[in-house]
Amino acid sequence: MSSPEHVPRDGPEKLDARRLRLGVLRMPAGLHTFDAFGSPAFRLLFLAVSGAGGGYWIQQVVVGWLIYDVTESPFLTSVALGLEAVPLLIMGPFGGFLVDVLDRRKLLTGVYLYQGTLALALAVGVILGYVGSGQIFAFLLLVGISWVITEPARASLTANIVPKGGLINAYALSTLGWGVTRLAVPVIGGFLINVLGGGPTLFLEALLFYVGAIFAFSIRVRDTRTSRPKLSSVIPGLLEGARYVKDHRVVLALLIFGLTTPMLIFPFVTGLLPVYAAEVYNVGPTGLGLLMSISGVGMVVGTLVVASLGNVNYKGKLIVGSVVTAGISMAALSLTTSYVVGLVILAALNTVQPFFYTTIQGTVQSIIPDELRGRISGLSMVTWGAFPVGSVLAGLLAENLGAQMATLIGAGILGVCLIILLRVFDFMWRLK
């Protein structure tokens, strides 16, 4: 039997726009919603990401509820949900370097197995009564180490499978898989916490990560790297990636704009949802699950719209407009105590996030050479290392002023940062 390296594989050069269009999902002329599904390798990657996404959202509900139940502290809850991003700040470039050196498919498979095993261990600990806040913090840090590799590997594999002109569509569809699981899984998780408890619910998280690993291992894709750095040349390899970003102002601007979501949007909204559920809306874990799931509704709608647009020529306007809309939505969320209204606002806020994230990711990956994809993606993941910084600030504000005032202040800071960034990178609004 041939090794995976000798199996015929999909590659960007083999997949033109006509072949990317699925015959069973014919769309009206001008719409490109499901183009990337024309690749068998991308369909497997989509299923892998969706399985892992389901596991992640189970984790968010269970861990968010457990940490608030144990500490009753908005500050510690916010900090805990941002701990996963700490390794990204420290180790992000090294994870990207590994993705450029090693087999990307095997790396993605390995980290999904690792995440599933961590969830299994936490489940046993919760059931046996050995888990407190310290163990939960340790679990989140260990999970965060895996994200150092997961996202650069996924982004690089996508770029290996799909042509440059279809990357925004492909990243939008990857986000769709993430969003569909967010739509249903948190509600299921909240229900299972009520019925079975946190420990047994974590078994479902482990199962979903293992499913993701099976699909990831099944991917066959052509490696288009013309060269790979040696594993021993870590520092020169990382410096090569850093020099590339420094010399390409558009890539630098996109990575810096990418800071706004993990630092000023997620910590002040998603990171405080357990506090909103307990203190603002007075709903239990099922209510928290619905808050997270309704965000999935917005994500699904947003990703379908982005995927349908194809390779748009107004990328800068999409990025800036989505940040503005997010800030307005955050301010609106901070001014209502209605659970129903809060659900609507969260759906709207998450509708615009795919416009921001997929446009940045697709644009960056369409510019950089394949042999640098992992390292540049690793540098991109460093921006998500800002999540703990935002989480500490959001948690302190929520502890002293309440969750809603914290979100309102976050919206104000976001607006100020956007104005500064547009003055420094004045070409962003015109970026095509």
Image (tube, grey):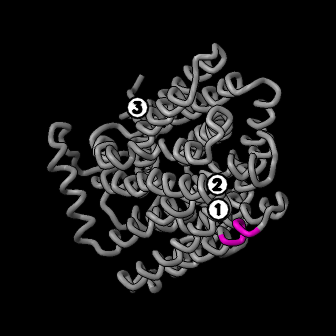
Q: Sequence order check: which comes first, mark 2 or mark 1?
A: 2
Packing grade of label 2 (10 A; few <14, some 14-19, many >=20) is many
Res. 95 mark: none
Measure the C-alpha gap from mark 2 to mark 3: 28 Å
Mark in front: 3 vs 1: 1
- Tell me if label 3 and label 1 are in contact, CB under 8 Å: no
Question: Label 3 is placed on what type of residue?
Answer: Pro
Question: Which class describes the residues within 10 Å of circle 3: few (<14), some (14-19), or many (20+)?
Answer: few
Amino acid residing under circle 1: Thr
Label 1's element? helix
The amino acid marked with disc number 2 is: Leu
* Extreme residue toward the top, this view: 128
Predominant SS along the magenta part: helix
**Residue pictured at 58% horizontal, 52% vertical:** 174
Q: Which residue is mark 1?
A: 303
Q: With respect to residue 99, does 424 lie above or below?
A: below
- Front residue of 335/178: it is 335
Residue 118, compared with residue 270, is above or below; it is: above
Residue 58 sits in quarter: top right
Q: CA distance from mark 2 to mark 1?
A: 6 Å
Q: Quadrant of residue 332?
A: bottom right
Residue at 57%, 34% in the rendered image: 212
Report x, y in % for residue 46. 58, 46
Q: Disc 2 vs disc 3: which is toward the camera?
A: 2
Report whether residue 22 is seen. Answer: yes
- Of mark 3 and mark 1, the one earlier in the sequence is 3
Secondary structure found at label 3: helix
The disc at residue 176 is: 2
In contact (CB < 8 Å): disc 2 and disc 1: yes
Q: Which residue is mark 3?
A: 4
Write the start and end of the magenta stretch as one range.
331-335
- Residue 294 at what x, y percent from top left? 76, 54
